Image (cartoon, coloured by chain):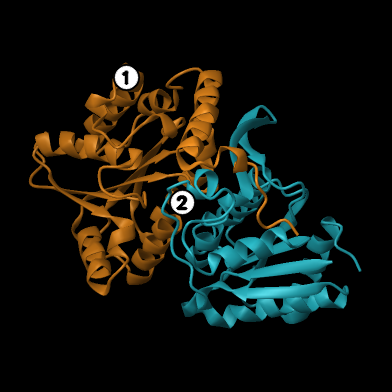
């Protein structure tokens, strides 16, 4: 199917620098595949764009011009990171003239993908309020196992993630919603949950050792 | 007993501050010591997602701004009240900014709660949590998301009890008081 020069906008919701977040890696994979299908793509890092009037204006312009918007973000305290909510408030207040399609990719640091469900519900509600067409959301658990590297360089562990994104791209490029199969594949654990939490707990200690804080990890600095 | 009211009303909706005022009045009428923070008026940068508050300076965010004091006040309270316009079902960005910066209150280490993985406690006792969501008109879907979000936050932040209520902009003060009194009673917040 011809893309007819359609525009896809990736909004990266992680506050981390470019090249450092799983959110960017997941979104960038989709964007690369859409580019290969002849779509015109643009990527905006939300946190950076909100730091100036010019950035906010560029964000709004990109949203207005997009036919398809993909938001990729990490779960923060059961919801979206504050800058992403701020961007949603900004877009809603501004109002949109045309109905773009809106899809999201959420990832969380817990093993279970279901922790993302509320954040997806918030995104769906935002799409409705802002006059966008909700075309589905993918939710990934064990996001802490991913890095900011391109997904192709992250090994066999991300096999089901890649399969999921390929299915999602196929659907989105054809103006369809993300299929259930893609949602199921994305929610599949990357490794057994016990292994993820064990590695995670070891990882916190290892990082603390680097900072010389291993014995302080359980400190209560604000104990009354 | 100490209560902290986190006012997450944004600068474009300051007429909603009256609801935070009513919350404080109700708590004071129960002889509680009440502090409030109008989050839009204080300096809170967005969380950088660096986990420095877990591994580099455990329990304290690396960014030195007002969020540190907000975090100290949260754990120093017996009750924390989130007052927020319900924003697509969730919290306003002003409130969320403060909450994103408060994860140093829990431990990075994992544990299981009700069969799900969450983070362990850092402090022995967290405050009770009351969510006060404000809507301009009834919206069942958003209200359900909001109430569920308060419940999920209570699990993750280890609040020993939680309740959520939804108020409407056009409600009168007495109507608002009735809803708040019910929610406070549900939490066991008495004089």
Tell me which corner region of the image, top left, top right, bottom left or bottom right, holds residue B3: bottom right
Q: Are marks 1 and 2 in contact (CB under 8 Å)?
A: no
Q: Is residue B86 above or below residue A113?
A: below
Q: Which residue is mark 2?
A: A80
**Residue A128, x across and y down, in percent:** 41, 55
Q: Chain of mark 2?
A: A
Of all residues shown, which one is farthest toward the front?
Answer: A212
Asked whether A211 or A27 is in front, the reply is A211
Mark 1 or mark 2, earlier in chain = 2
**Residue B110, x across and y down, in percent:** 60, 32
Q: Is residue B36 above or below residue A193?
A: below
Q: Would you say B190 lies left or right of A35 here?
A: right
- Numbered tag placed on residue A159 in the rendering: 1
Q: Would you say B110 lies left or right of B179 here?
A: left
Letter of the chain shown cyan in the rendering: B
Of all residues shown, which one is farthest toward the right?
Answer: B191
């Amino acid at each position: 199917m011809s893309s007819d020069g359609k525009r896809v906008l990736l909004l990266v919701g992680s506050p981390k620098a470019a090249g450092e977040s799983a959110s960017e890696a997941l979104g960038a994979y989709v964007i690369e595949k859409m580019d290969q299908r002849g779509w015109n793509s643009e990527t905006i890092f939300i946190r950076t764009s909100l730091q100036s009037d010019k950035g906010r204006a560029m964000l709004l312009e990109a949203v207005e011009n997009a036919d398809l918007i993909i938001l990729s973000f990490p779960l923060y305290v059961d919801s979206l990171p504050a800058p992403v909510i701020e961007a949603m408030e900004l877009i809603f207040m501004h109002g949109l003239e045309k109905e773009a399609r809106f899809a999201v990719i959420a990832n969380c640091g817990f093993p279970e993908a279901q922790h993302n469900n509320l954040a997806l519900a918030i995104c769906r509600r935002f799409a409705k309020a802002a006059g966008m067409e909700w075309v589905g959301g993918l939710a990934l658990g064990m996001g802490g196992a991913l890095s900011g590297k391109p997904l192709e360089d992250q090994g066999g562990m991300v096999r089901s993630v890649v399969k999921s994104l390929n299915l999602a791209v196929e659907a989105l490029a054809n103006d369809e919603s993300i299929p259930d199969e893609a949602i199921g594949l994305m929610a599949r654990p990357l490794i057994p949950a016990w292994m993820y939490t064990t590695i995670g707990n070891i990882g916190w200690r290892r990082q603390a050792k680097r900072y010389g804080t291993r014995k302080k990890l359980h400190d209560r600095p604000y104990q009354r | 007993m100490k209560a902290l009211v986190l006012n997450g009303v944004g600068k474009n909706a300051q007429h909603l501050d009256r609801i935070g005022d009513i919350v404080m009045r109700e708590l004071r009428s129960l002889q509680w010591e009440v502090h409030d923070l109008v989050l839009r008026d204080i300096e809170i940068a967005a969380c950088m997602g660096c986990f420095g508050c877990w591994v580099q300076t455990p329990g304290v965010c690396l960014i030195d701004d007002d969020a540190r004091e907000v975090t100290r006040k949260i754990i120093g309270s017996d009750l924390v009240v989130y007052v927020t316009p319900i924003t697509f079902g969730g919290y306003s960005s002003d409130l969320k900014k403060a909450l994103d910066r408060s994860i140093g209150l829990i431990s990075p280490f994992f544990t299981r709660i009700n069969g799900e993985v969450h983070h362990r406690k850092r402090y022995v006792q967290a405050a009770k949590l009351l969510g006060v969501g404000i809507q301009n008109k009834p919206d069942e879907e958003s209200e359900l998301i909001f109430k569920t979000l308060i419940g999920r936050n209570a699990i993750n932040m280890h609040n020993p009890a939680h309740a959520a209520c939804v108020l409407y902009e056009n409600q009168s003060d007495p109507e608002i008081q009735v809803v708040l009194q019910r929610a406070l009673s549900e939490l066991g917040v008495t004089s």
